[in-house]
Amino acid sequence: MSDALIIDDNRSTADALLQMLTLLHVPARAAYGSSAGMSVLSSFTPSLILLDITMPGVDGLEVLGFLRREPRLAAVPVLVITLDDQPETRDRALKRGANAIIIKPATLDVLEANLRKLGVLKAGDGAAKAESTDAKDLTKEKRAAGGVVLGNALGPIRAGLMAPDFELLDDQGVRRRLSECRGKPVVLYFYPADDTPGCTREACGFRDDYPMYRSAGFTVLGISPDTVRSHARFRAKYGIPYALLADGDHRVCAMYGVWGRKQLMGRAYDGVLRTTFVIDSAGRIARVFEKVRPAEHSGEVLAVLKSL
């Protein structure tokens, strides 16, 4: 299968799509703008085209029309990406030959669902991976204890990219999207499991320093694979003042590159690689903290926030 091609003049958006396609095991390349896209297409036939039809100064629907008039590209599936969620825009894009449409900001789940609809992903493909038998046999305490990272090919999303959007249930069962925080900076931290020693120290560090985060205008969010009910108990037990989000199938962890291979007492398993992302008010990742030391971490984050 040849590479997919992303045509988008926004480098951060295009790079975020590249990251998500990599997680879905779809090889891809990006062309930053319509002119660059046309240049690539002059000598390359992709397996899929992801086209932003809302690029400034460009009639994206005309570009779409060209793709459908060009015999060599007429059969290539086109996934249109747009900021405009009006029904008439969707209708016009479909009439011009779009095979599917995603409203920005795209999430991994939505992208994966559309790729399955288009037949790009088959059964068994995608981001979700079944945990090994060894991993299932480990207790939650062992999962949370940390350990040596055996390998995570992608690593966390790097600073400078737009933070991928997602939607998860919080500890109260309320659906939350990261994009709802746009306009305010965010501290987004991933941790292995509720009510385990390291994770409790880390959560309580953010709890104790929470007034300083609030005064600096930051939203704090924690994410782990635990259930909504587990999060509710954890918050209540330790008086945690910020929301905890439930990523039960660890898809958001995978999207951010923090789900990887670990080792404890000679046994390998998949789990959360304790990582924190500082996201600016525009939704861009400003700083990434890896190999976090739970007891000291909140102070480390606060020191960086003062320099942003």
Image (cartoon, rainbow, N blue to C red):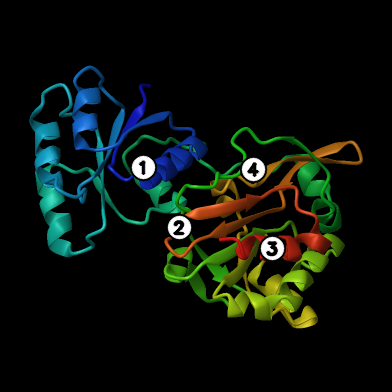
Residue receiving disc 3: 303
Q: Position of residue 228 (x, y in %)?
A: 64, 71
For residue 59, above or below residue 276: above
Q: Is residue 187 left or right of residue 38?
A: right
**Three-letter amino acid code of the residue under disc 2:** Asp
Which is in the foreground here, disc 4 or disc 2?
2
> Which sits earlier in the primary sequence, circle 3 or circle 1?
1
Cβ–Cβ under 8 Å for marks 2 and 1 = no
Residue 22 higher or lower than 193, as above or below: above
In this orientation, which residue lies closer to the viewer: 219 or 190?
Answer: 219
**Marks 1 and 4, how far apart at CA:** 32 Å
Residue at the limit of the structure toward the right, as seen here: 265
Q: Residue at x 82, y 49 (%)?
A: 146
Neighbour tally class for label 2: few under 14, some 14-19, many 20 plus, Cα within 10 Å = some
- Residue type at mark 4: give it: Ala
Whichever of labels 1 and 4 marks the residue nearer the N terminus, that label is 1
